[in-house]
Image (cartoon, rainbow, N blue to C red):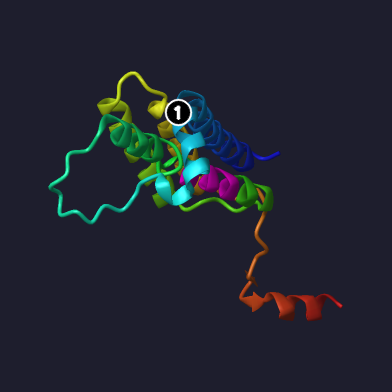
Amino acid sequence: MNSRKRMLRWASGIMLVLGIGHLSLLALVASEDIAGWVGRGIWAAVPLELTGGGTVQTLASLQNKLAFWAAPGSFAVPLILLGCLTWHLAGRGVAVPAGVGWGLAAWCLIGGVLLVPSPFFAGSVSGVLMILAARKKDGRERPEIRRSGASVGESRRRSR
């Protein structure tokens, strides 16, 4: 396994562990709220209130909204999808663009600073691995396009 593929697989593994771990932890902590969504319907997770903002929100409604935005509405689901995409592209030998790694690293660093202590900083490691993999040269040799002024096709015809 070449080093680019190894770096991308590590980056995707970190993203998958963070995303799945986040959803699993929230499923344990907010299991009552999630069970309530199943009973009332998934649209009950964050109900649309057209009252003009004059009503006072109850503690239960705030906990319900917090559970939604902390679990399925969080960045955990897109992080899992990005981890799966990175794993798939690594298997094909294709690096994720460095800009995606820069964005992920910056987002995780800011999140880690704002939400200390948290595993956000592990996501920045994943972003840095993506950046390094994108900048790494491909391990395969590229065929020469010109040999001594002649194209590859001409040099093949001459050698026959």
107 or 90, which lies in front?
107
User: How many discs appear?
Assistant: 1
Instruction: Look at the image and give the residue range highlighted in magenta.
Output: 77-86
Q: Main secondary structure of the magenta part?
A: helix
Residue 115: quadrant of the picture: top left
In the current view of this chain or complex, which residue is farthest to the left?
A: 54
x, y (%) of residue 84? Answer: 59, 46
x, y (%) of residue 76? Answer: 46, 39
In the current view of this chain or complex, which residue is farthest to the top?
A: 117
x, y (%) of residue 116? Answer: 30, 21
- Residue type at the position of mark 1: Ala
54 or 28, which lies in front?
54
Q: Which residue is mark 1?
A: 30
Asked if residue 129 lies left or right of residue 104, the reply is right
Asked if residue 83 lies left or right of residue 52, the reply is right
x 58%, y 34%: residue: 13
Quadrant position of the N terminus in the picture: top right
Which SS class for mark 1? loop
105 or 83, which lies in front?
83
Asked if residue 155 lies left or right of residue 134, the reply is right
- Give the class, few, some or many, for how many residues have Cα within 10 Å of label 1's Cα (few <14, many ≥20): some
